[in-house]
Image (spheres, coloured by chain):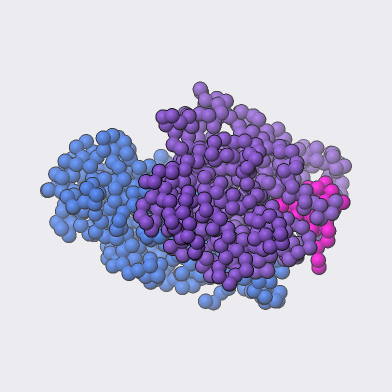
Amino acid sequence: MPLTLQDKVTHLLRRAGFAARPEEIEAGVARGLAATAEQLINFDRVPDNLGVLPTVPKGHDEHDGAEYLSMSEEDFRYVEGHFIEDINLFWLNAMITTTRPLQEKMVLFWHHLFATSFDGVYDVRQMYLQNENFRGNFNPITGQIVRPHASNPFPVGNYRQMLEYLSQDPAMLFWLDNWENHKHTPEVGSNENYARELLELFSLGVFDPVTGEPNYTERDVRQASRALTGWSVHMPGENNPDNFPRRFFFNSSRDVHDYGPYQVLGVTFSGDGRRLFDVIVQYKRPGQPQSACGRYLGYRLFKFFGYDNPEPEVINDLADVFDGVHGGERYSIRQMLRRIFTPGNPSSEAFYSEKAFRAQIKSPTEYLVSAYRLLNPGAMRLILQNADRDDLPIVYRLPETMRKMGQQLFRPPNVGGWKDGPNWINTTLHLSRINLAAQIADARWPQQGGIDVRQILLDNGLFQGSNFTRAPKEPYVDYFTRLLLQSSVAPELRQALVQYLNTPANGLGGDVERKKVQGLIFLILTMPAFHLH
Amino acid sequence: MGKTTRRDFLKTSGCTVLTVGLSQHAFFRRTQQASASALTAAAALSTTNNVLVVVQLDGGNDGLNTVIPASGRLHSLYRDARPQLSVPEAEILPLGADAANHRIGLHPAMAPLKALYDRPEKPVAVIQGVGYPNPNRSHFRSQDIWHTANPERIEKTGWLGDYLDVAYPSVDNPFLAVSVGGELPLMLRSQNRVIPGIDNLDEYQIYAGDDADAANKVQTFLALNRVGAPEQTLYEHIRRTALELYESTQAVQRSAQNYTPDPTIVYPDNNPLAGALRQVAQIIAANLGTRIFYVAMGGFDTHTAQSYDHASLLATLSGAIDPFYRDMVRLGQANRVLLMTWSEFGRKVRQNADIGTDHGAAAPQLIVGGAVKGGIYGVHPNLTDLYDEDDMKHSIDFRSVYTTILEQWFGVSARDILGGRFEPVRFL
């Protein structure tokens, strides 16, 4: 059965963002699918509500309230652990509260595609700079965060420019060693780590997703490595005001940068290395109508927003958009997203198909963010404003819970990113999701990041107080399944939830209604349907 | 391959029914077959029932101060290179002579391990001078080399993960390998399965609140997950995992009952490795079908004032192995449990200016188990013939040790997993 308009709007809001709230679905249906998609895509027309990075929390002596980014490296070592937690909370809060859901979704996409871990950077603060880089707020030349930075192509701009910004990102330069890639021999740079991943993971794929053929050779890797020699970082020190390595530095010395000529993907060029990115985005294998990079990105974008193993027609359709065959801007990620989300073409037909609908397992990030966005959008903001973390035990534990669910932000398992899809769920990871659901549902006090159950019931005319035991339970079940799952549930499931609310429990004491509804929320958050979107 | 499991099905189907063109009926039949409890699934291609416990010494253990030249010219060279870090001859715990007739012994902090070494069944093998060609002194790169058994090329799966893929392609037991401590090491990363990390067995249970309603919630949770949706692959994956999860938490919690501590076998409280190995013992006692356990212990990157720290690390290591081995004997499991230590490299021969040691190359490995032919294997590295002037040369490739484990312990061919043929070390 084809999806209804309401289904399509809900699907779009869940995938292009993190959750579909009832009022958003209603507005989307009234506005129509294409207009809703356009509003999501043109997120930069909506005012940015991004929070600020917290400062060092209380209890750290002379560092109390200090700005993380301006501390000396030596002082920073004392508060590094807090910083890692705080950038997690900063970003989770951004995803939960953002007025620009597709922007934050794309930051998550880039973090997954350009997977960088704080385990391999020089200074963990570089991870925060990278996060802002992916949002379009970082200038690698000055090392400064500027919101927005006019020429930064992230998160949905020109992919050729993105590759250049990525190659100048301080965290990436350390993570894949390019900062120490210098001229070595006429055949190779001194460190090919970045060049290899640039071709293998960031632009072409080890195998073409349509033909299954390799797109590049070992020689291409080595030659690309030569082109990238001297792409490095300003190290702090004399005559350099930086407190940690945060600015791109092109070392133009002929001893360090290899000016070529080199030959990559059949093109011979020389110079400062920037030509490499043109070569990569333009490369077509002989006999193939689409660019290899366009296919790879089409594949990765559709896999992220739609479903695994997209059909070759979908991949090629998106690659055509990347290549500009319809006359639009070339290498534009925004145009590719528009293709996926705007009805009336092969890619969006796949995206709005039954095959895609509710057929993707939420990542741990999406699981957590969707629960908060639907139940308690303000939870995380509290901790970011409150210096005393001990008052907010639930929120404070979230980074650790994320680790146990298998997705520690800023710490992917390796440069290949997280193993997603069905791998998000095994017994241990699933257990951690259940225990997160319990944490969220049990948190009693709204001021501690908990759910204000009573207020939700009052706002929706459901509050029964002392009449709870005798009241019909179906309205509770119907309201919360619609809120959390954006649909009603099968009769057996509905009946099981009603029965739970009707089952007396000894020792619950007063306020049975609140406790039972908290139990109901816990149960819905653990249902298979809530893990899907 | 007899059984088709859920994981197998997901793998071959690419997770969508449409991509493989399976009819709904066929899908339903296959998932019916898959519904047999994961915990009772038989081992498919593996021919043994043996267990490997991997203990990682993270940071680069100083092998020269672990297994020490105890006399003669090697000892005097050792003393000269380490005026403040060397252990006096009289304090070294003697193990005997190696094949080249070097007398060697253990650091004095390792008395419990020395006592194991001296047991009549000789359960401890000391493999000397283990390493690989062109040693890499980066912690990460060198660890990756040990994890993946490939010094030449960066790989995304580990040698034990590859072993699991080869030997258990259709076994869906979620506990086939367990990383105790939560992180998934590269060594266990496989193409086809996600290995659980269990931080703490006590926490491996569904938490549904602490009031009288908790049991109602768990019952409702199970009821909700008993309603199938056979045409929805991912829904079924989640639903079945939820039911397996409930079973496995029950199994783990029952394991607390299977495992009764013996008052004479003490896992010291202040020894985190002992705490982890105690959890390994509990899981072994619970008989969950686990074949590989992974435990890591950090702190071996001893660049400054090494003496005290290193002694304490070695005391922790041997103080944890000792109760674990005795516990295995008590549980009747010692002959099917093999423990192997590894570290990414040893340290330089000469102490540095901070009375510590810097990143080096070859180092010893310890193998412990009832099936081990205890003793000294290989020869102690020469302290005058060095790599880059200050690093001991290896005489045994680490992949030879892996070969022994794969072929003689797990009963599979090592060549494909290790990408070449390596002469086994005959410690089994």
Residue at the spot x=42%, y=41% of the render?
Answer: B269
Residue at the spot x=64%, y=29% of the render?
Answer: A386
Above or below for A83 versus A485: above
Q: Report the span colored magenta.
A: A1-30
In depth, the one of A39 and A488 nearer the eye is A39
Tell me the chief SS of the magenta region.
helix
Q: Could you tell me which quadrant the N terminus of chain A lies in?
A: bottom right
Is A18 included in the stretch rendered in magenta? yes
In depth, the one of B284 and A317 nearer the eye is A317
Q: Quadrant of residue A362?
A: bottom right
Q: Quadrant of residue B355?
A: top left
User: Is residue A300 among what the camera can see?
Assistant: no
Does A107 sit left or right of B202 as displayed? right
In depth, the one of A358 and A150 nearer the eye is A150
Does A353 sit left or right of A295 as displayed? right
Farthest residue in the left direction? B72
Residue A160 coordinates in the image, percent (x, y): 59, 53
Is A291 included in the stretch rendered in magenta? no
User: Is residue A281 among what the camera can see?
Assistant: yes
Chain B colour is blue
Residue at the spot x=80%, y=58% of the render?
Answer: A7
Above or below for B23 versus B398: below
In depth, the one of A46 and A160 nearer the eye is A160
Q: Could you tell me which quadrant the C terminus of chain A lies in?
A: bottom right
Which lettered chain is shown in purple? A
Residue at the spot x=71%, y=46% of the render?
Answer: A101
Residue A505 coordinates in the image, percent (x, y): 74, 46
